[in-house]
Image (cartoon, helix red, strand yellow):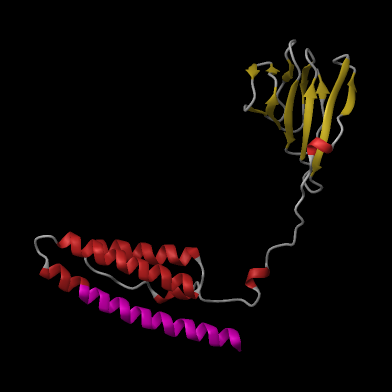
Amino acid sequence: MYTGLLNFTILCVFGLAGLVVAGAQGILKAGHAAQVERPEVVIVCRARGLRRFARRLVLMLCGRCALASGFTQQAAISCNTGSYEPPPVSFLCSFMILKPGHNREMRDANLIAIDSNALPWEERPNEKIGRSLFRKNLITDEDTGMEIRLVRYPAGAVNPTHTHPCAHGMYVLEGILVTHDGHYGPGHFVWFPEGSVMEHGATAERDVTVLFITNKPFEIHYQ
């Protein structure tokens, strides 16, 4: 019952707004006729006032940016030509069907915050490299298998030619990332497409630390 009453009230207010806008049309025409020498000044000034009025009215009633944008855009276009036609009823009513609890449709989700500085580096021996790599696992998505971790390659450690059944990216935090296609310093993000043949690691001079991101469960296959 309350929803129906609210919709009826909003419809009445928009009807009143239509009358006000129709009156504004007459003002625009009168101003246009009276200011033949500089008609664009009158039209632009009143168009701005009409846009502000429409924006405030719509935001107050519905709080919907889409309606405000469409309503004021039509007002701006019409006023620049010296006339105004109110938006069709179907345009207005499409935004006026309010559902109880419509602001509670978002799924509840808990924020995840991880202090990576407090996490220890996990040593991962690698037979192909002949030495260990180090990582800090940050998060794994249960639905997609997407993983985000910190990875550190010791100086001189380069993962030899291999492929992955997933795509992955590396955002360089410290050091220089060596790849089969070039060297990249801090601030670079390097994306390796799924199935591509690659090599990556650290220069001989210093370690490299990267933020490592996959788009699905991680596997590695050496050539």
Is 157 rendered above or below residue 33?
above
Is 98 rendered above or below residue 202?
below
Residue 8 visible, this orientation: yes
Q: Quadrant of residue 117?
A: top right
At 80% from the left edge and 39% from the top edge, which residue is drawn?
A: 138
At 59% from the left edge and 84% from the top edge, which residue is drawn?
A: 3
Is 174 rendered above or below residue 50?
above
Magenta region, mostly helix, strand or loop? helix
Q: Position of residue 180 (x, y in %)?
A: 68, 16
Q: Quadrant of residue 176?
A: top right
Is 135 covered by the magenta stretch? Answer: no
At 77% from the left edge and 28% from the top edge, which residue is drawn?
A: 164
Of residues 73 and 120, the one drawn nearer to the viewer in this rendering: 120
Q: Position of residue 9 (x, y in %)?
A: 48, 85
Count of residue discs: 0
Residue most toward the top? 204
Residue 91 visible, this orientation: no
Q: Quadrant of residue 18?
A: bottom left
> Does 183 sit left or right of 152 as displayed?
left
Residue most toward the left? 37
Of residues 44 and 129, the one drawn nearer to the viewer in this rendering: 44
Q: Position of residue 179 (x, y in %)?
A: 69, 18
Q: Quadrant of the N terminus?
A: bottom right
Is 15 covered by the magenta stretch? Answer: yes
Q: Position of residue 19 (x, y in %)?
A: 32, 81
Is 68 rendered above or below residue 186?
below
At 43% from the left edge and 62% from the top edge, which residue is drawn?
A: 69
> Does 47 sit left or right of 17 as displayed?
left
Magenta segment, which residues? Answer: 1-27
Q: Quadrant of the C terminus?
A: top right
